[in-house]
Amino acid sequence: MENNYSDIDLARYFSGQCTDTEKESIESWSEFSPENKELFNSARFVWERSLEAENVPYKTEDALGKVHARLGMNNNKQLKNKTLTIYSKIAAIAAVIMLPLLFFYLLSKNNQQTEIAYKTVNTENEIRNI
């Protein structure tokens, strides 16, 4: 019985997704020789440990906080927020000052009447308007 099963076949066996004939074939293969039994048991061991690894609860926010603490990023984030707040206040003050000035400028520009300068120059041969 030289049939070597792939990791995919063994994973299907351990997950219960194989047919009855495949299941019997894998079981008889594992009992055929000590090498096959050892390979089967090591594959089962890896399968069971991978299931345990999937069920480990992670606290991602705590882990990220630890990483930031090690990198010294917590203070930097607070500084960025503070700087952004200061720039927002400066922009608001500038807008409060500039908008009325712009409004006044545009109104005064519309009220000015443009005077047209017209000059007539007489020469010997012709009359030119400048």
Image: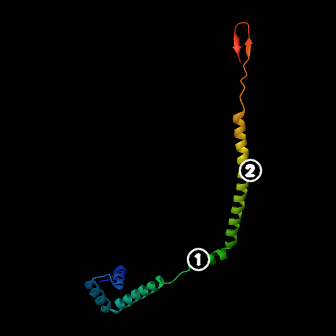
Residue 61's disc is 1
Which part of the image, by quadrant, shows the C terminus? Answer: top right
Q: Give the total of numbered labels.
A: 2
Q: Nearer the viewer, residue 21 or 93?
A: 93
Identify the residue at image location x=64%, y=74%. 68
Q: Quadrant of residue 38?
A: bottom left
Point out residue 117 in the picture as x, y percentages from the top left corner: 73, 22
Identify the residue at image location x=60%, y=79%. 62
Q: Secondary structure at mark 2?
A: helix
Q: Nearer the viewer, residue 20 or 110?
A: 110
Q: Is residue 61 above or below residue 129?
A: below
- Residue that label 2 marks: 97
Q: Nearer the viewer, residue 128 or 73?
A: 128
Contact flag, marks 1 and 2 (Cβ < 8 Å): no
Q: Residues within 10 Å of mark 1 (few under 14, many from 20)?
A: few
Identify the residue at image location x=73%, y=14%. 120
Classify residue 38 as left or right of residue 107.
Answer: left
Q: Is residue 100 above or below residue 22?
A: above
Residue 6's disc is none
Point out residue 98 in the picture as x, y percentages from the top left corner: 72, 48
Q: Is residue 109 something one can see in this rendering?
A: yes
Amino acid type at image mark 1? Glu
Q: Residues within 10 Å of mark 2 (few under 14, many from 20)?
A: few
Point out residue 86 in the picture as x, y percentages from the top left corner: 72, 61
Point out residue 8 in the picture as x, y percentages from the top left corner: 36, 79
